[in-house]
Image (cartoon, rainbow, N blue to C red):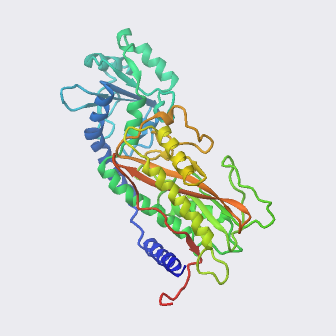
Amino acid sequence: MKKLVLSLVLGVVCAVTCMAQQAKVLSLREQAVVQDRWLKERCQTLLPELMRKEGIDMWLIIAREYNEDPVLRTMLPATWLSARRTTMLLVYDPGKDKALEFLACARYDVGEVFKKAWDPEKEPDQWKRLAELIAERDPQRIAINTSVNYGHADGLSAFHNQKLREALPPKYEKRLVSGEKLAVNWLEVRTPAELTVYEQICRIAHDIIAEGLSETVIQPGITTTDDVVWFYREKVRALGLESWFHPTCDVQRADPKGNEQNRSFAQRPDAAIIQPGDLVHIDFGIKYLGLNTDTQQNAYVLKPGESAPPRYLLEAYQKGLRLMDILTGEYRSGRSGNEILAATISKAKGEGLNPQIYSHPIGYHGHGAGPAIGMWDMQSGVPGTGDYPILPNTAYAIELNNKVFLPEWNKEVRIMLEQNAVFDGEKTHYADNRQKILYLIPRPKSNFGE
């Protein structure tokens, strides 16, 4: 037990050190330079591969101001915070290993990538000009963003779908196809440059969580879970970052009378005053440089005289980590989310675990496009999105819990864990690693020589 306590203390010291050396958050101007460079690189290197994989000759992305297609938002320059009037982007593949053509049926260039291809003085009708651009290139398969399974890939409004079909000659209207797979691939696949920085983005998120799960923020007997939630919201704003969802903070504690029940994931937890002996859980995510994080971590509030959590709580936490290992060990390129879910649950139950899996892709969106690996209320598979295959160079929120009955607490607890991970096609690794030990509140002031 002494070795375990020493390991915990060393881990806490490391966490505090990392928090003091928090990765730099770039200014908005610096962020814009990086994001525009990434967009240009993605369009030149990633998009040709994705279009040819799906057999798409032309991709149309059309949206109007304040009703932006989710894909369009990822193709706008960093200084464009929304579409302008009706924004029409065309990506055309001339084939034979030629470079893609990027056009904007607009009055002006859309950033450095999409070049102006409409002069209203010569042709006042924007839709007629769009039809001309299409006819001039004669594409055989024209992808539009309509999708049954993914809101991310269903950004073409009903009105614009109708206008497009009215503007096109019948032979080109017949060539319109759903761009679901192309849109999902574009949103989920990350470039090497993005993956390098994603490690740092996750580190920033981890450092913020570590600060919140410390005596800097939490004073047992006084601080409420809502206080912690709002600390995170204000901290994110102060650093110049964005929150993509309102954080959650909740506690689990001993229940001698057996009156408590686990809350449903369909509702937020009630506010509670954090007390010694509590297991504190946080669900937190940021958006930075256009990419999202989604992380759940835990802390134990020491009782007077304690220097480490009870052994039974540490053992329960290790079972949660084991469940994560089982899940990431089932990742295979081309395997569907539902296949990974079934294999994970089967193996976990075979080891005596009590799993609940609800992992998801992450990237441009927190709940990203790509294969769903369970949902908290769908443990037998997720129709549609769960049938989508795992691809290399994609990121996931490894989100799950394992339920353990603690006789000492007279109740079942959920060890709720979530960590962002990257699948490179062969193996899965955690971005900026994962929480392997519980944070301690307060941090122990132990003599390492004892």
Residue 214 visible somewhere in the drawing: no
366 left or right of 404 in image: left
383 left or right of 81 in image: right
- Identify which residue is drawn at 47% across, 61% down: 205
What is the x, y in percent for residue 33? 32, 52
- Identify which residue is drawn at 76% across, 65% down: 255
From the viewer's perspective, is residue 141 above or below residue 425?
above
Q: Quadrant of the N terminus?
A: bottom right
From the viewer's perspective, is residue 128 above or below residue 146?
above
What is the x, y in percent for residue 276? 68, 74
Q: How many marks?
A: 0
**On the image, which quarter does residue 217 sit in?**
bottom right
- Identify which residue is drawn at 26% across, 19% down: 137
**Residue furthest front in the image:** 350
From the viewer's perspective, is residue 269 above or below residue 363?
below
Residue 113 visible somewhere in the drawing: yes
What is the x, y in percent for residue 439? 55, 71
What is the x, y in percent for residue 419? 48, 56
Residue in the foreground of this view, choosing between 380 and 420? 380
Residue in the foreground of this view, choosing between 254 and 63? 254
